[in-house]
């Protein structure tokens, strides 16, 4: 085996996108494509079995998405990841998940070349050796229920039909355990290392990451509107544009929240 080869796995649920990426990568003699996966469940199994150097991973996939694939690899060898997405808004999330790089569809040849160069440099560097521990630290805040749910998805042949999101959320708030229906949640915002969950006129403070909470909430009902805020879209009653490209959301309880320009595509949810 040629140790100079970059052993690569491709993951995308769109056959045409998968084939297009494969054809582009075949133009690089240093790349060896060792597997192609059509969903997250396949990806986790192939990554664990083949231990690739690099994975091109689609973010938006039914069942187990790209971020779920990364989380499912906790405790095992972690390759370098290049996230592939049709939406720029996922770029920030990708880098927060310690992705080596991200590429926006349709894949640009120069952008792909840059990503491969970064992968070659990372493979040779000591920093790459620490990537697994960084991922584990980043994802360590996941609850046991969330980890079990990911494992269940991976092993369930009917994974595409499963409901990923809980209707009821339980979490510790001080000395007690609070159980909330998802629809009771009005909005969530960050306060340092803590999350403030606002529901029914009360604020519950928990030690959890924004990303971990996003895993538990249905994105069709809960949307990130700011780097440090998630809102229940069903609670939004008014939308006020601002001259700088931002918006102000008015909830049914009168609360005003800012929707930053980075998340302006969320506006479509309210129109």
Image (cartoon, rainbow, N blue to C red):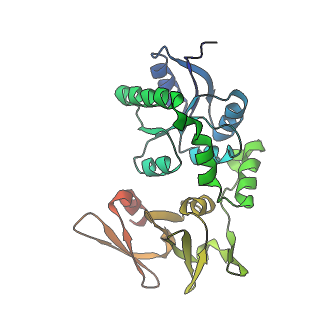
| Figure quadrant of residue 194 | bottom right
In front of the other: 76 or 37: 76
Q: Position of residue 73 (x, y in %)?
A: 68, 43
Residue, x 49% and y 70% (percent of image)?
A: 231
| Figure quadrant of residue 158 | top right
User: Residue lying furthest left in this view?
Assistant: 243
Residue, x 41% and y 31% (percent of image)?
A: 107
Relative horizontal placement of residue 224, taking residue 131 as reference (left or right): left
Q: Quadrant of the C terminus?
A: bottom left
Q: Is residue 269 above or below residue 178?
A: above
Q: Position of residue 94 (x, y in %)?
A: 49, 47
Q: Position of residue 215 (x, y in %)?
A: 61, 58
In front of the other: 99 or 58: 99
Q: Position of residue 174 (x, y in %)?
A: 67, 80
Relative horizontal placement of residue 53, taking residue 16 as reference (left or right): right
In front of the other: 128 or 47: 128
Q: Is residue 153 above or below residue 11?
A: below
Q: Is residue 36 above or below residue 254?
A: above
Q: Quadrant of the N terminus?
A: top right
User: Residue lying furthest bottom in this view?
Assistant: 201
Residue, x 62% and y 45% (percent of image)?
A: 133
User: Residue lying furthest front in this view?
Assistant: 126
């Amino acid at each position: 085996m040629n140790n100079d080869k970059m052993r690569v796995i491709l993951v995308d649920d769109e056959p045409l996108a998968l084939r297009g990426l494969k054809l582009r990568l075949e133009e690089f003699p240093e790349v060896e494509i060792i597997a192609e996966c059509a969903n997250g469940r396949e990806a986790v199994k192939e990554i664990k079995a083949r231990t690739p150097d690099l994975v091109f991973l689609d973010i938006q996939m039914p069942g187990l998405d790209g971020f779920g694939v990364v989380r499912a690899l906790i405790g095992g060898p972690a390759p370098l990841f290049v996230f592939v997405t049709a939406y720029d808004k996922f770029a920030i999330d990708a880098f927060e998940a310690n992705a080596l790089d991200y590429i926006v569809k349709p894949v640009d040849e120069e952008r792909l070349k840059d990503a491969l160069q970064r992968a070659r440099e990372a493979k040779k560097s000591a920093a790459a050796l620490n990537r697994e521990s960084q991922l584990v630290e980043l994802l360590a805040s996941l609850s046991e229920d969330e980890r079990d749910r990911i494992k269940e998805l991976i092993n369930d042949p009917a994974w595409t039909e499963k409901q990923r999101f809980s209707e009821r959320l339980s979490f510790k708030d001080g000395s007690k355990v609070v159980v909330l229906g998802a629809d009771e949640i009005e909005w969530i915002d960050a306060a340092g290392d803590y999350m403030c969950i606002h529901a029914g006129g009360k604020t519950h403070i928990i030690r959890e990451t924004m990303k971990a909470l996003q895993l538990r909430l249905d994105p069709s009902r809960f949307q990130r509107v700011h780097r440090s805020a998630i809102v229940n879209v069903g609670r939004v009653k008014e939308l006020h544009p601002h001259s700088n490209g931002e918006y102000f959301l008015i909830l049914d309880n009168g609360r005003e929240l800012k929707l930053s320009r980075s998340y302006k595509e969320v506006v479509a949810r309210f129109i």
